[in-house]
Image (spheres, helix red, strand yellow):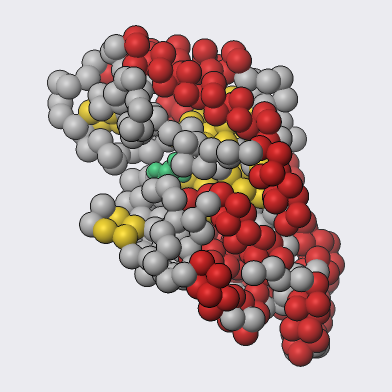
Amino acid sequence: MRINIDHISAFNKEQEDSYIDELDLLKNRFSKKGISIDKIIQKVADFQVAIPSWALGAGGTRFGRFSYGGEPASLEQKLDDIGVLQALTKSAGAVSLHIPWDIPDDVKAIKEVAQSHGIAFDAMNSNTFQDQPDAKETYKFGSLSNTDPAAREYAIQHNKDVIKIGKELGSKSLTVWLADGANFPGQNNFQRALNNTEDSLKSIYKVMPEDWKLFIEYKPYEPNFYSTVIQDWGTSFMLANACGERAYTLVDLGHHLPNTNIEQIVATLMLKGKLGGFHFNDSKYGDDDVTVGSIKPYALFLIFNELVYGMKNNPQNPGLSWMIDASHNTKDPLEDLLQSLEAILIAYIQALLVDQKALSIAQQEHDVVRCQEILQDAYRNDVRPILKAAREKSGAAVNPLQAYRELGVRKELIKERGTKTMATGL
Ligand code: PSV
Ligand code: MN
Ligand code: MN
């Protein structure tokens, strides 16, 4: 199923002007504070989030997977699905591939499919958390941290292979997330595991092309429940510094213990020029990977407030690699991703509405109440008219989810691919 410009303009025509009055109200209100809604519209129209290749099937848990019907059965079909998201939103112009789940058989052909949808190849993800059927070494007791040099070398080589594939595709970064850790006290020597990990990461970093970045992702627990080698941002930051200038920390919203102040982590990393990648999702308990903004939208806004501040004030920090890292069992995966994209852009707009000058003065004057009011004055707006204007500007559907349903995309995909398909990977 291909969505073309005619579908979008016909849909937008029906919606014409439905949001203009509300947009004008917002423009008037915020121009008094010296905030230009037109500039915000442009920023939002430019914002691109990568879609991970593993989010296009109805995900699952270790208790089972249930097909949604019409799921992509190949990398080409996954790119086609991202093409649908991109045509509807114009903010999903990249894919983040997982190797070996998505090894392209024919690189040239895959590049052509991606290009035809306007999709770029964002960060490559290596996988040393499960053994593949033909594996020569096992990761059962760790990969880059393993006490066995042969297992370590095997995991290093896998990352080198991923870089090679990424180079052919035109990607410019590698994300490393390790499951390495221990389930029981005494199982691992913490210092040895950390040293091994640092040495292994350095070997990978050394072969990375000059224009590539390495993103080091952290996570406090799961699948190991006693200790994880790269458990927090401090460990990731330390390893990134040890590797070199082009190594960065990657923040995944679900990879924190309850109540962690993620916005403060973001601010600290950006100040130090070391925030490289960002994975969006939401959670109630742990690494739940549910739809962005579905549970803690105010927390997402506060995080975006720091991201926006950092993007403006921290030239030492590179442009970020944004990705949605969410997938689960019960929704149409494409509808779910549309909801996540919507939540991301809404939080971004709300953060752009924060009157930073007034906030800085209130902070200086220790007017705590005013500080809170300023943040909430930005948050407590229905900013969807701004988002619709940005979408209209970039040639997207003003309401992508509604357009998706009205165009009957899932029905079409089921017709093309069948009801029993199951996405590869996971
Ligand atoms: C595992 O927690 C995980 O969700 C990490 O967030 C990675 O980014 C992802 O899997 C893919 O390896
Ligand atoms: Mn992640
Ligand atoms: Mn995760």
Q: Residue at x 45, y 56 (%)?
A: 423
Q: Is residue 350 left or right of residue 32?
A: left
* Res 233 → quadrant: top left
Residue 283 spot, x, y in % from top left: 38, 58
Q: Is residue 307 visible?
A: no
* Res 124 → quadrant: top right
Q: Residue at x 81, y 77 (%)?
A: 6
Residue 38 spot, x, y in % from top left: 84, 67
Q: Is residue 296 left or right of residue 380?
A: left
Question: In this rendering, is residue 130 above or below 157?
Answer: below
**Quadrant location of the N terminus in the rendered image:** bottom right
Q: Is residue 160 visible?
A: yes
Q: Residue at x 71, y 39 (%)?
A: 108
The tally of labels here is: 0
Q: Is residue 117 left or right of residue 238?
A: right
Question: In this rendering, is residue 238 above or below 206?
Answer: below
Instruction: Choose between 405 and 116: the one closer to the eye.
Output: 116
Question: In this rendering, is residue 131 above or below 311?
Answer: above
Question: In this rendering, is residue 179 above or below 374?
Answer: above
Q: Residue at x 71, y 71 (%)?
A: 3
Residue 326 spot, x, y in % from top left: 46, 56
Instruction: Choose between 102 and 279: the one closer to the eye.
Output: 102
